[in-house]
Image (cartoon, rainbow, N blue to C red):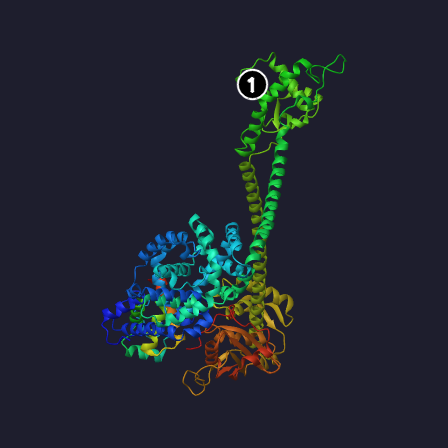
Amino acid sequence: MVDVANMSDAELRTKLLEFGFPVMPITGTTRKVMEKKLKILMENKNKVNNEGRRSLTRYSSEEESDVDVKIKKDKKRATMAAPPTRVTLRKTTRKTENDNEINMGRPIISEEKRTTRTTKVTTVESGFDTGSDSESEIIERSFKSPVNNHDIKKAPSPVSSSSYVETIRKYSPPKFAEDVISKPVSTTYSPRSTAYSSNASDYASDRLNQIRSRLSLGSPSYDRPLYSTTTSSMSSKSIITTEKDEDHVETPFLSNFTKRLSQLSSNSRLDDYKNEDYKIKEHDTNGSGGVEIRSYMTRPYRSNFQRDYQSAKQANSKNNLVSFAVIALAFLFFIVIAIAYMGLHSGQTAVDSIGASDLKVNYCDKSAAYKPGVNCIHLSQLRDAVRVYEIIKSELLKHAIDHRCLSSGIKPYMTEQDILHHINKHPTDFIDIHKSLRDMELLTLTNPQWETALVKINNDKMSGTPIRDFNELYDARGTAEIALTILDPSLPWSCSIYNKIAAIIQTAVILAVGFTAVYSLNRGYKYYKHYQQKQKDELFYMVERIIDTLQTNATEDGDNFLVINHVRDMILPINDRARMEQTWKRAIYFINKNESRVRTELQVVQGEPYEVWRWLGSPNLNTSGSRNKSWQGQAFETQVGSVNSLPCSPTPCLKIRGMVDDGDRNLHTIREAVLSKCAHQCRILHCAVDTNSKCVYLKCADQNDAAIAYRSLHGWWYAGNLVTVKYLRLERYLQRYPDSPVSGPPYLKALQPATDWSS
Amino acid sequence: MSSTSQKHRNFVAEPMGDKPVTDLAGVGEVLGKRLIAAGFDKAYVVLGQFLVLKKNQELFQEWMKDTCQANAKQSLDCYTCLSDWCEEFL
């Protein structure tokens, strides 16, 4: 054993290289890891040799024994550091051609191309995999990807593979049949001992390369090269199969023997490859059983696949047939539909071609009912009439289509003038073109399948009224211009699609406009409602305050009246008076109409007559109820840090005592008072006055807001009472007011602009 | 991958800059201390080691184990973290 610790960096690197490890910088920090790695590699190599038994029972392979023997034989080469794989390969291929019996049915020729291509990759890969504990995992991972390929690949090439199997079958006894089938995958048949020693190492390395290239690349060529039979490998197969019988018979004994041999072999790069083989090649020595294990599939797939391999191939072709049939049916179906659809369209246009056979003609005869040129046609002129139609038909169609597709400014019809003009452009030999035209017009009336209509042009030059019978036509000829048109032309695709899209857009626009109208109406209605509600609220508030004011000013004796305008000036601040004018007027109206305790009268105040309100109600209410319902100042300090305020608020809910008196009517006033006191400072979600408990409940947006409200309310005088505030648990609050909003906005605001109480 | 930790996602989300080594997924306080003692005080130093080992998972985990006695989970986390970061920013 080499002393790893005492190696120089360069030696270490070379050594690792020898084990097929990729070149990696050996630095102060990586050296330790690399040393360890090298040790593991060396140990592993030995361990595999010594403890090979154990792993072999799991992974044992006749393959590795094969390799070992060859390594033994070719030790010189094996000890070489980083042997040039490419060269080996070349050699191998050269040899393959000569020694077919050695290659034993592995189509190395086809394989070789691939291997050379991938040599570089595989060496790197192998370096990582070699000898480490995780190696089987890595390999398994690399197995996984090929699984799909494997399955897929199988299907398209059943012919070649089955033919291969058959050829082999012919030569091999049935006992090995299954084995043989999997051979293309496992690529080996038996360990050949010393007999092939001269070529053995080449063979071995080649084999390894094959395997590694497959593993690392997960190439779809898993079975391709195996099944695709070049002529040379074909020939080799025939030889193999003859040989195989005896090989297989001796396999178990030989492999054991070679394994033992391999334990003695040392210090070779190929050993590491062999390690890999141990793990990869689960091709066991005992015949068919091992074959199952060793496949390129992951474990769950393995046995199934191998067992069902043969039947699967037959089933595959059957399955393929069914699925192909289904696909073909689907195709047929669509084709039929397409044809039917085309037929529908062409059916319409087919009418355009005029068969003289299905022409309905009113021929003129001697009877007086028929008048030539009016309602009948002479047989001799029929041909000319039809020719006129044929000439103008396409032009008519063009007009009609252009009208619908290009612009509606183009006339959809052709007047007689247009028709004559058009016909004159063509070299024609009509005897009497006018007569022919008239005959043709008659024909269009009798032949609706022409899909051409006669119209009488209206005054606006763009539309016309259709003419349906001979009499109408006759009348129209005298009075108006006659025109021909195609009422329902079959439009080209782009045009009809364009028209459809235009129609859709139009509809969409109409719908959108409709929706917008509905939506805005809805919004308008809601806004109106809201506005009305607001007005009402303002009005009631105003009225309440007026009554309050009157009540407050009323005395037992003396004149209990106030000039209306004075009341207004008392209630409304200066800057609001203009804005609240309307509300005020409505409040006056409301009081005059609905308030029985207030009487409006004319009084002379200071020499001038004024409209006044006289308070008729009991002045008792005055003292008990709403005597100056307002904040009257602070009783004690509740600023931060003072004894009376908590350092931080525990809940967002407050319970305010001392604001509600017995029999208090003006709950609204109290609520307003609370809001006006603190709503401008904090966000209040809910505020309710409860007369039973004589408390005001206040819910703020969060604890901080509650703290602000607490500070601005606690310890104040309100209407002669000291207000105390307590924090209330949120659960209790929700018990009492389950409908209170959980979060805002909207937050409550005071109707009255907040007064600055801090002064 | 939904099973990555918040730490992993945080680390992979942005260039590592001057982040301390403890910002790496899988490297906690204890491992961080050991790594700093070994001279790997910043995440980018560990990244350097990670790169020197050619992003080889096995070797990196081995190295983590050697330098700071990281267990398999920690070293794997760290490895995934760095390799994801590299995929993103390198």
Q: Which residue lies at the image location 54% right of the left edge and 34% below the top edge?
A: A405
Residue B13 visible here: no
- A72 vs A5, left or right, is right
Total count of labels: 1
Q: Which residue is mark 1?
A: A423
Percent position of residue A524, x then y: 57, 56
| Quadrant of the rendered image containing residue A334 | top right
* The C terminus of chain A: image quadrant: bottom left
Numbered disc 1: what chain?
Answer: A
Q: Nearer the viewer, residue A517 or A189?
A: A189
Q: Residues within 10 Å of mark 1 (few under 14, many from 20)?
A: some
Q: Position of residue A98 (x, y in %)?
A: 37, 52
Task: Identify the amino acid type marked 1.
Answer: Ile
Q: Quadrant of the N terminus of chain A?
A: bottom left
Residue A465 in sight from this viewpoint: yes
Question: Helix, strand or loop at disc 1?
Answer: helix
